[in-house]
Image (spheres, rainbow, N blue to C red):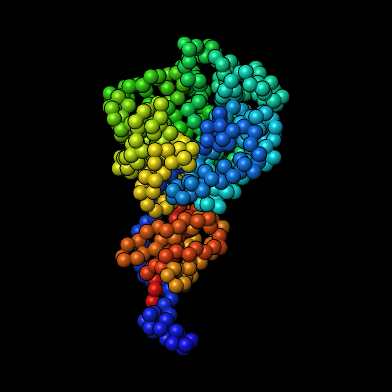
Amino acid sequence: MIRLLLLSLALAGGGRAQTYAPVNERPPGLAREFRGAWIASVHNIDWPSAKGLSASSQQSELRAILDQVAALKMNAVVFQVRPQCDALYQSSIEPWSSWLTGTMGRSPGYDPLSFCIREAHARGIEVHAWFNPFRALCSNSQQIAGNHICRSTPGITKRYGSMTWCDPASPDSRSRALNVILDVVRRYDIDGVHLDDYFYPYPTGGLNFSDGKSPAQRRAYIDGFVSNLYASVKRQKSWVRVGISPFGIWRPGVPAGIEAGLDSYEQLAGDSRKWLKNGWVDYLAPQLYWRISPQKQSFPALLTWWRQQGSRPVWPGIATARIHSSDDPGRPASEITNQIDITRKIGKNWNGHIHWSAKSLVSNRGGIATQLAATYTQPAAIPPMPWVSSKAPAAPGVSASVQGANTLVRWSATDGTAAKIAVQARNGGIWRTVKIDPSGAGQATIPRADALAVTALDRFGNASPPKVLGLN
């Protein structure tokens, strides 16, 4: 009986066991796209879902977000770590955030940023640490810790309506924000530094930000801060990407026909076009939260203009949270998938976009997660940064074997520069990316493939030559 079974198996395999060996074949280049989602902690928008949850509950919620991001074949999260001169990480400069425990300065019992990095990297997901550089308090009525800037250095803060801001005109204010960010870059294994649109406060209630400075002076302060931040991060860890997410319209009437309720250039001191043109960012993520039509705030018209303004990538923010929302009743999930399709067709540079925000993906708002399964058809590698480095990592060591209906792929990194491993498989003459995993020695089981290619990726996104194996 055993002899007959062995004979039948041999005949099924053509009389001999099939093995993989190097072949002279070149697969297509890896799919490249930045697929991100913001995880907002301020007001408990995305995470944690409420103040005062136990450490285990917070961690369970964050794992669920990262599991969904991974399941959708996305590759990055933008994790808010400094909402209001506070910290969602262990800091000797600023107090623990009240959005964690309900009390500013009280430890949650673990380090959320360390936890996020460990869990995300294990899933092949990048973590971009998101900082609000100048917002000091979202509400002046809240309790503050003794080491919060409003108590330790009140002279560099200004009240604005119900909020408090660090005055960007103050050198101490700019230095404080820069030091906080560089402290995180130095101590944590983050992949990016991300700033949002809050440089000066959005106008509210007809109030003026009373600093005696002109709009041009304010822009000069912010321009200097952005330029200095970019250079400082690159000196410390050159692979850490610097991204900014400004208001989606640079100025009303630009491009022609575009309308806006405010002038971010004049009122927020955000000359975001300059930052892109001058290469002070590795990517710009303008918040293009409007629909494809009408023309006055047209998503494709704005994206086309932005992608003409510089040589660095423009990865727009898209408003997944507005699906069937009070802000935009009737917006279907297809609006978002159609916008992603547009980002892949318009303009130059590398593809990418960021969802506002993670909660909508986890809740499958309007069926968006279901629809994204047909949009993100295979894993994508993070785009490279050739303006920083274009040196390819060494190719990995690779072996593979047939395991019934599957293929077992094993790899080992051959130098210390690889951060991720990408596995492509060919069946029926078609190549597809099937996995992008953390680097180092590892293995993966994939559906049986006629041929496979394994590529190492470094922290800059550079790819090694692929190691290609085929069945013989």
Determine the residue positioned at 35% across, 41% down: 337
In the displayed structure, does residue 432 sit left or right of residue 127? left
Q: Residue furthest front?
A: 1
Q: Nearer the viewer, residue 298 or 43?
A: 43
Residue 415 horizontal/vertical position (percent): 55, 60
Determine the residue positioned at 28% across, 27% down: 294
Q: Nearer the viewer, residue 162 or 397?
A: 162
Give residue 53's quadrant in the image.
top right
Residue 327 horizontal/vertical position (percent): 40, 26
Residue 381 horizontal/vertical position (percent): 43, 51
Report the number of discs. Answer: 0
Give residue 368's quadrant in the image.
top left
Determine the residue positioned at 50% across, 56% down: 437
Residue 464 horizontal/vertical position (percent): 45, 59
Q: Is residue 153 visible?
A: no
Q: Nearer the viewer, residue 363 or 459?
A: 363
In the displayed structure, does residue 171 sit left or right of residue 70? right
Determine the residue positioned at 59% across, 22% down: 137
Asked if 408 appears above or below 231 in the picture, the reply is: below
Asked if 432 appears above or below 170 in the picture, the reply is: below
Q: Nearer the viewer, residue 216 or 35?
A: 35
Q: Residue furthest right?
A: 146
Q: Is residue 219 visible?
A: yes
